[in-house]
C-alpha cells in the first residue's frame, strides 16, 4: 500500500512539473507597473499625489453631535434641539512656475430636531498668486482668530464659529515682517451675512405720529468693498478692516401719501470698521491667548453682529436704513465690542470665556436697543482630533425700545423677559 501511495504522489508531481514547463513556454501578458500613492509633504500633513498627476490632495472630514438648550418662552418652543452634522472636505495644491494653485471645498449635511436634512456648501474657492475667488470660509472683514474661544460665536459680535457664507473676489499682498493687505469684492446680498434694503420698519412723520411703509429690494449694482491690513508675529496677531456697503431698494409705497406710491428712493451707502487683536499668553500655559475686537457700522448692521436684533422674548426688526414719510434716508448705527480668553488647564483640557456688548440706534428713540452676552465653555480632547465639550451662556437686552412709541408689528413681545440662557453639549471628531 505504501508503494502504491508513493507511486501516485510521484506521478502527480511529475504531471505538475510538465504542466509548469509547458506553461512557461506559452506567451504571457506583462503586468502593468503598479503606481503607489506618494506622500506630498510640502503642503502639510495628510496630502498625497493623485496617481498620474502632479496635484496634491488631502481628504478630511468632521462628524459632530450637538445637544442644544435654549430657554423656552412658549409651550410650542423646543427647549432641546438634537443635531447631527457630517462634513466632507477636499483640499488640493498644484505647484506651478507662478506658485501653487489651490482649490478647496467643504460640504456638510445637517439633521436637526423636527427638521428635514439640509445640505450646505460651507466653502468652495480657488487661490492663486494672491487671488481668492469663490465662496470663502468667512468674510475678509471678520477677525477669524476669535472663533477659537466660543462654539457659538462671539456673542453680540459674532456670526458663528464655522459657517462661512460669502462669495468673494479678493487679492492679498504679503509683505515682509508679518504684514499683509487684502482688498475684496464681496456679495452684499448674501442673506445670511448681510441685511440689506428697506423692510417695512417705522417711518417718522413728525415728533408724535408714526406711519409704516413697504418696498421691494432693488437689484444689486455694486458689491461690498472690503479692505483689511494684517500683522502676525510671535506675540500674536492684529488686524484693521473696513467695508463699504450699498443699500438699494426698489419702488416704495409710503403711508399717508406724503411720498407718492412708486417713488424711487435714493441708493444709500453705509460703512463699517473693525479692529482686532490676539495676544499670546505662553507665560500662563502653552496655547493661551487673549482676544479683543471692536466694530462700528453706519448703515451696515451685519458687520457688527446686528443683522438680527433681539434677546429673550423680544424680537426687533433690524434694517440698514429707514426712510421717513418724505422719502429721506436715515442710516442705522450699530457697534459692538467683544473680548475672550482661551486657557489650557492641561494639554488636553481648555476653557474659553467671552463677553460682548453692543447697541443699535435706529432713526428715532423708539427703536434703540443694547445687549450684553457672556459665556464660557470647557473642552476635553482625550485623543487627537476628538473634542468633547460643553458651553453655557446668557444674553440680555440691557436697553429696550419704548413700546408706547413703537408702531404696530415693529416689535414682538411674547413675554416680559429680556434675557435668555443657552447651552450646548458637543462631541466632535475631525479626521
Image (cartoon, rainbow, N blue to C red):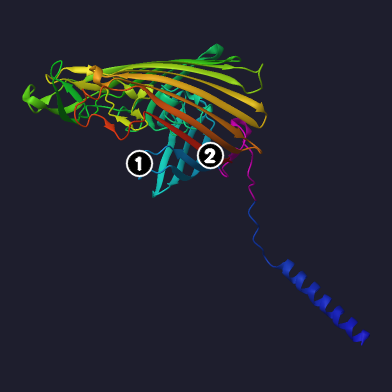
**Camera-side residue of 133 and 221:** 221
**Camera-side residue of 201 and 412:** 412
Image location of residue 140, percent across then percent down: 42, 23
Q: Secondary structure at mark 1?
A: loop
**Residue 49 magenta:** yes
**Camera-side residue of 28 and 149:** 149
Instruction: Give left or right: position of 236 versus 423.
Output: right
Instruction: Give yes or no for contact between labels 2 and 1 (Cβ–Cβ under 8 Å).
Output: no
Q: Quadrant of residue 73?
A: top left
Rendered-image quadrant of the N terminus: bottom right
Magenta-tinted stretch: 34-52
Report the residue at 48% width, 22% height from top.
355
Q: Is residue 297 in view from this perspective? A: yes
Q: What type of secondary structure mainly makes up the magenta span?
A: loop
Image location of residue 111, percent across then percent down: 44, 47
Instruction: Give left or right: position of 12 versus 359.
Output: right
Task: Identify the disc placed on residue 148.
Answer: none
Image location of residue 384, percent across then percent down: 65, 37
Q: Quadrant of residue 79?
A: top left
Q: Which residue is mark 2?
A: 425
Identify the mark nearer the N-term, 2 or 1. 1
Q: Is residue 230 in view from this perspective? A: no
Looking at this rendering, what residue extends furthest in the right direction? Answer: 2
Report the residue at 27% width, 28% height from top.
317
- Whether residue 14 is situated above or below residue 348 in the rendered picture: below
Instruction: Give left or right: position of 357 versus 177.
Output: left
Q: Which residue is mark 1?
A: 74
Q: Secondary structure at mark 2?
A: strand
**Camera-side residue of 381 and 235:** 381
Instruction: Give left or right: position of 195 versus 267.
Output: right
**Residue 313 magenta:** no
Amino acid at each position: 500500500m505504501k508503494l502504491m501511495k508513493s507511486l501516485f504522489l510521484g506521478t502527480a508531481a511529475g504531471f505538475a512539473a510538465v504542466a509548469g514547463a509547458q506553461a512557461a513556454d506559452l506567451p504571457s501578458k506583462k503586468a502593468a507597473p503598479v503606481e503607489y500613492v506618494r506622500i506630498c509633504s510640502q503642503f502639510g500633513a495628510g496630502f498625497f499625489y493623485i496617481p498620474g498627476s502632479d496635484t496634491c490632495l488631502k481628504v478630511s472630514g468632521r462628524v459632530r453631535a450637538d445637544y442644544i438648550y435654549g430657554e423656552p418662552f412658549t409651550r410650542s418652543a423646543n427647549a432641546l434641539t438634537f443635531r447631527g452634522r457630517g462634513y466632507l472636505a477636499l483640499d488640493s495644491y498644484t505647484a506651478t512656475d507662478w506658485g501653487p494653485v489651490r482649490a478647496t471645498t467643504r460640504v456638510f449635511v445637517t439633521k436637526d430636531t423636527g427638521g428635514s436634512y439640509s445640505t450646505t456648501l460651507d466653502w468652495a474657492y480657488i487661490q492663486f498668486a494672491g487671488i481668492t475667488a469663490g465662496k470663502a470660509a468667512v468674510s475678509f472683514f471678520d477677525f477669524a482668530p476669535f472663533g477659537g474661544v466660543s462654539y457659538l460665536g462671539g456673542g453680540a459680535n459674532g456670526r458663528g464659529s464655522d459657517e462661512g457664507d460669502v462669495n468673494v473676489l479678493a487679492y492679498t499682498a504679503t509683505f515682509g515682517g508679518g504684514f499683509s493687505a487684502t482688498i475684496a469684492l464681496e456679495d452684499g446680498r448674501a442673506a445670511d451675512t448681510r441685511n440689506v434694503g428697506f423692510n417695512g420698519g417705522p417711518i417718522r412723520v413728525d415728533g408724535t405720529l408714526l406711519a409704516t411703509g413697504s418696498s421691494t429690494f432693488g437689484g444689486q449694482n455694486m458689491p461690498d468693498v472690503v479692505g483689511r491690513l494684517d500683522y502676525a508675529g510671535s506675540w500674536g496677531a492684529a488686524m484693521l478692516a473696513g467695508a463699504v456697503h450699498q443699500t438699494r431698494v426698489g419702488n416704495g409705497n409710503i403711508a399717508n401719501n406724503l411720498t407718492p406710491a412708486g417713488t424711487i428712493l435714493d441708493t444709500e451707502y453705509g460703512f463699517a470698521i473693525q479692529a482686532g487683536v490676539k495676544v499670546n499668553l505662553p507665560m500662563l500655559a502653552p496655547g493661551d491667548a487673549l482676544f479683543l475686537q471692536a466694530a462700528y457700522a453706519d448703515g451696515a448692521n451685519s458687520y457688527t453682529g446686528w443683522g438680527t436684533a433681539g434677546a429673550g422674548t423680544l424680537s426687533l426688526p433690524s434694517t440698514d436704513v429707514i426712510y421717513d414719510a418724505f422719502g429721506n434716508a436715515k442710516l442705522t448705527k450699530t457697534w459692538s465690542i467683544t473680548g475672550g480668553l482661551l486657557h489650557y488647564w492641561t494639554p488636553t483640557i481648555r476653557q474659553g470665556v467671552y463677553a460682548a456688548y453692543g447697541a443699535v440706534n435706529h432713526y428715532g428713540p423708539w427703536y434703540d436697543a443694547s445687549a450684553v452676552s457672556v459665556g464660557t465653555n470647557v473642552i476635553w480632547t482625550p485623543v487627537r482630533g476628538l473634542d468633547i465639550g460643553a458651553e453655557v451662556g446668557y444674553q440680555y437686552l440691557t436697553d429696550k425700545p419704548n413700546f408706547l412709541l413703537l408702531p404696530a408689528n415693529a416689535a414682538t413681545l411674547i413675554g416680559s423677559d429680556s434675557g435668555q440662557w443657552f447651552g450646548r453639549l458637543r462631541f466632535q471628531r475631525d479626521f
